[in-house]
């Protein structure tokens, strides 16, 4: 399969995040993309740049005023005499108004984000758009006949919703890929999210839709980020009722517990009989991940690739999380390598 990557994504750099009470350099760094790219080049994968998709394509899954906010946020911040990372100072919790978007930059920032881990810096917009273009390009390759494609996206996307950002995510790359497939011949698309964290943004975007099935395997929100979504009783609403499937797992989960949940997820996808699959591929399920609590090991990523290939669907893989810098490249290469081996044997 071909790999889509843009160096513009590295413009999102130098941010800080609130982590367990301390302000730390962002775990989500350009080095993540560099180590994944190096591992895939060593593995012999062909790497292509993204196509120059118009920014209007973002509006297929995002709100126009939200996109406008992201585009202009950092210049509003610097116009106020500030530099460094934009982080919020308050959120519209219960008892506060949800229906007013403050005109000032600090209030607007708290309105559009839901955590203090997702800094906006000078290059964030350019990088996020580049990542979105990578995802759209991978989806286009699959829509045009490639059996699979991998978008090396960063910043990631699955925590970003129609009109909010957070969890290191600004624009929802996987949702853009799924929508592209819907627009180009796929009547039904499944999204399988195997990132350690629940894909709350993707869930929100497709919550009331029956044409996109969202299935997520993740650490239980009882004890893990994003805390306020991702429970098993969330099943979609309206026409989308039954088309969201959440499989939360306990901290400490190992492959022998993960695998049955993955099989259940793939069974749900097989019953849906989609025309294409989008995989939100986080490798923060790894035992050495610095912010996560699952215990997957290196060979487990090859098995994951085997399982994904066994779905026998045109597949767009979109990079999400994974913060063990030294190992994420090899783990992504294991997933893609196993996927390809199985595809070639067809
Ligand atoms: N400050 C993805 O894997 N923060 N996002 C957790 C550390 C947010 C992870 C606490 C973690 C978001 C795409
Ligand atoms: Zn994650």
Image (spheres, helix red, strand yellow):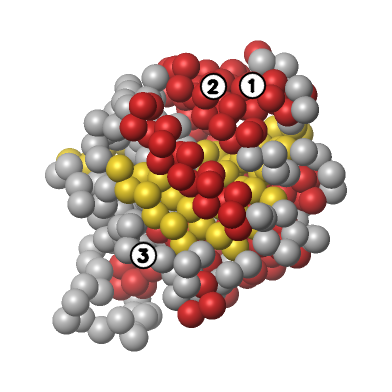
Residue at numbered disc 2: 302
Tell me where residue 59 sits by quadrant: bottom right
- CA gap, disc 1 to disc 2? 7 Å
Q: What label does residue 234 carry, if any?
A: 3
x then y, percent, for residue 248: 32, 48
Q: Quadrant of the N terminus?
A: top right
Placement of 101 over or under 43, stated as above or below: below
Residue at numbered disc 1: 337
Tell me where residue 151 sits by quadrant: top right
Query: Left or right: 338 with respect to 21?
Result: right
State whether label 2 is within 8 Å of ligand 2: no
Query: Left or right: 33 with respect to 290?
Result: right
Query: Left or right: 184 with respect to 132?
Result: right
Q: Secondary structure at mark 1?
A: helix
Neighbours of disc 1 within 10 Å: few (<14), some (14-19), many (20+): many
Name the residue rendered at 64%, 48% in the picture: 277
Name the residue rendered at 25%, 69% in the picture: 91
> Is residue 274 at all visible to an observer of this figure?
yes
Name the residue rendered at 32%, 63% in the picture: 233
- CA gap, disc 1 to disc 3? 33 Å
Q: Secondary structure at mark 3?
A: loop
x then y, percent, for residue 295: 31, 26
The disc, 1 or 3, on the residue closer to the chain's N-terminal end is 3
x then y, percent, for residue 33: 54, 31
Name the residue rendered at 19%, 77% in the picture: 94
Q: Nearer the viewer, mark 1 or mark 3?
A: 3
- CA gap, disc 2 to disc 3? 30 Å
x then y, percent, for residue 144: 84, 48
User: Are circles 1 and 2 on residues that touch, CB within 8 Å?
Assistant: yes
Q: Secondary structure at mark 2?
A: helix
Q: Quadrant of the C terminus?
A: top right
């Amino acid at each position: 399969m071909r790999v889509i990557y843009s160096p513009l994504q590295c413009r999102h750099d130098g941010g800080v995040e609130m982590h367990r009470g301390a302000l730390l350099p962002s775990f989500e760094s350009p080095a993540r993309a560099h180590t994944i790219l190096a591992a895939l080049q060593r593995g012999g994968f062909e790497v292509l740049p993204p196509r120059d998709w118009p920014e209007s394509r973002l509006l297929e899954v995002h709100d126009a005023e939200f996109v406008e906010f992201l585009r202009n946020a950092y210049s509003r911040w610097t116009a106020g005499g500030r530099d460094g990372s934009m982080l919020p100072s308050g959120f519209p919790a219960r008892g506060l108004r949800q229906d007013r978007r403050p005109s000032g930059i600090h209030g607007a920032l708290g309105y559009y984000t839901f955590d203090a881990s997702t800094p906006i810096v000078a290059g964030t917009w350019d990088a996020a758009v580049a990542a979105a273009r990578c995802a759209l390009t991978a989806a286009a390759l699959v829509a045009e006949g490639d059996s699979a494609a991998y978008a090396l996206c960063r910043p990631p996307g699955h925590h970003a919703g129609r009109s909010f950002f957070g969890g290191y995510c600004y624009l929802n790359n996987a949702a853009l890929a799924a929508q592209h497939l819907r627009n180009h011949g796929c009547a039904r698309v499944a999204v399988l999210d195997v990132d350690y964290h629940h894909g709350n943004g993707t869930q929100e975007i497709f919550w009331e839709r029956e044409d996109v099935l969202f299935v997520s395997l993740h650490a239980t929100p009882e004890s893990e980020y994003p805390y306020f979504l991702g429970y098993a009783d969330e099943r979609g609403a309206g026409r989308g009722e039954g088309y969201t499937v959440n499989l939360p797992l306990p901290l400490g989960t190992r492959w022998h517990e993960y695998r049955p949940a993955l099989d259940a997820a793939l069974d749900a996808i097989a019953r849906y009989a989609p025309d294409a699959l989008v995989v939100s591929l986080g490798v923060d399920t790894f035992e050495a991940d610095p912010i996560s609590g699952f215990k997957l090991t290196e060979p487990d990523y090859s098995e994951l690739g085997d399982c994904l290939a066994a779905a026998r669907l045109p597949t767009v893989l979109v990079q999400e999380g994974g913060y063990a810098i030294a190992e994420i490249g090899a783990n992504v290469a294991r997933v893609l390598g196993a996927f390809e081996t199985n595809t070639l044997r067809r």
